[in-house]
Amino acid sequence: MYRFNDKKPIMGGRLKACHALKLPFVFGNLHQPGVTSFTGNLPERKQISKQMHDAWISFACNGNPNHDQLLEEWTVL
């Protein structure tokens, strides 16, 4: 389980982390048309996307989302 609670620029930030918003981050599709309306275009979005993508890959491969690029270790709940 993880929490993705970044405020988004669309609708003055009222949507927060709305349904499926994580998908462009997980799959590295931040560049697709219309995505920046929801995700914004700040440089750190690419870093967040890379970290999420790598965590999902790591989890799929070995059951552990931790990897070298994470800022802090992901602990088991």
Image: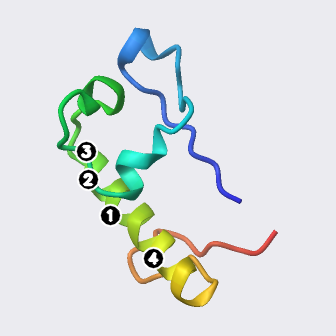
Q: CA distance from mark 4 to mark 1?
A: 11 Å
Question: What residue is shown with label 4?
Answer: 57
Question: What residue is shown with label 3?
Answer: 30
Q: In the displayed structure, does residue 52 sit left or right of residue 16? A: left
Looking at the picture, tell me which residue is in the foreground, 31 or 14.
Answer: 31
Q: Residue at x 52, y 14 (%)?
A: 14
- Residue 60 % position (x, y): 54, 79
Determine which of the numbered discs, if any, sits on residue 50 in the image.
1
Give the SS element for disc 2: helix
Q: CA distance from mark 3 to mark 4?
A: 18 Å
Q: Residue furthest top?
A: 11
Q: CA distance from mark 2 to mark 1?
A: 6 Å
- Residue 16 % position (x, y): 53, 25
Q: Is residue 37 above or below residue 50?
A: above
Mark earlier in primary sequence (3, 1): 3
What's the residue type where badge 3 is placed?
Leu
Q: Residue furthest right?
A: 77
Identify the image quadrant of residue 54.
bottom left
Determine which of the numbered discs, if any, sits on residue 9 in the image.
none
Mark 3 or 1: in front is 3
Question: What residue is shown with label 2?
Answer: 46
Q: Residue at x 82, y 68 (%)?
A: 77
Mark 3 or 2: in front is 3
Give the SS element for disc 1: helix
Mark earlier in primary sequence (4, 1): 1
- Residue 40 % position (x, y): 28, 30
Q: In the displayed structure, does residue 64 sit left or right of residue 53? A: right
Q: Can residue 48 be spotted in the picture? A: yes
Q: Residue at x 46, y 82 (%)?
A: 67
